Amino acid sequence: MPLTCRYYDVTELADPELFARGMELLPWPDRREKALRYRFAKDQRLCVGAGLLAAHMLRQAGARDLTLGYADFDKPYLANHPSIHFNLSHSGHVVACAVSDAPVGVDVEVVHDHGPAVAAYCYQPQELDWLAQADDTAHAFTRLWVRKESYIKLIGTGLSREPRSFSVIPGEPMENDAAFAEFAVHDCLLCVCAFAKAQVTPSEWKLADWG
């Protein structure tokens, strides 16, 4: 099964009819309940959109039973399809999902410079030097962050692994031979991380693709 990644601009779910249809199509009742617990409509759309995108891609990958289990740090997995791996991310109005036959991590983030204090907390000195040399600080800051986030999601530690404990400078070797594939989507950067060279080209998804 090839590594695949798709992303979804959930703003179409601002249409009440499409949102209602999306809620109806979601295969996980607990995600419907979670979506409705959010106070803001934008968060409801992200929750529903992420579930729809994941369910569609997992079925495309051959999953017939979408029962979820949760590993350490609440990383979800398909309880009855151990050979199908997936990962989700969302930021702004975009959700992303990667599916593979091996562990995979994905992160999508709106391009933003969070400032020197956050950078000093997240990045090693050599990463700060790399950031200081960048022409576009917001893009460079976000590029480092999506690489870090997708990696810790790949290895399943979440933010229990301190961001400053490893370096993700582009072009330098990565621990565990992890590899990144990075893309610009809408106003975001998207990064897929795998233990082998990430041969993937993300494509956009719409609710009309549900089929």
Image (cartoon, rainbow, N blue to C red):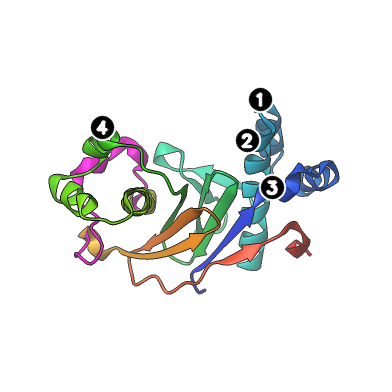
Find residue 16 and report its image quarter.
Answer: top right
Q: What residue type is labelled 1?
A: Arg
List x then y, in percent, for residue 156. Answer: 37, 47
Q: What residue type is labelled 3?
A: Thr
Label of residue 117 in the image: 4
State how far apart marks 2 and 1 are (Cα).
Answer: 8 Å
Q: Mark 1 points at which residue?
A: 39
Q: Which residue is drawn at 16% across and 50% down?
A: 129
Question: Which element type, helix, strand or loop, lies under badge 4?
Answer: helix
Q: Which residue is drawn at 52% across and 53% down?
A: 187
Q: Name the residue under label 2.
A: 43
Q: Name the residue under label 3.
A: 11
Closest to the observer: 3 or 132?
132
Q: Residue at x 19, y 64 (%)?
A: 172
Which dot, 4 or 1, sits closer to the camera? 4
Label of residue 89 in the image: none
Question: Is the Cβ of the residue at disc 1 closer than 8 Å to that at disc 3?
Answer: no
Q: Residues within 10 Å of mark 1 (few under 14, many from 20)?
A: few
Task: Name above or below for residue 61 compared with residue 46.
Answer: below
Question: Which element type, helix, strand or loop, lies under badge 3?
Answer: helix
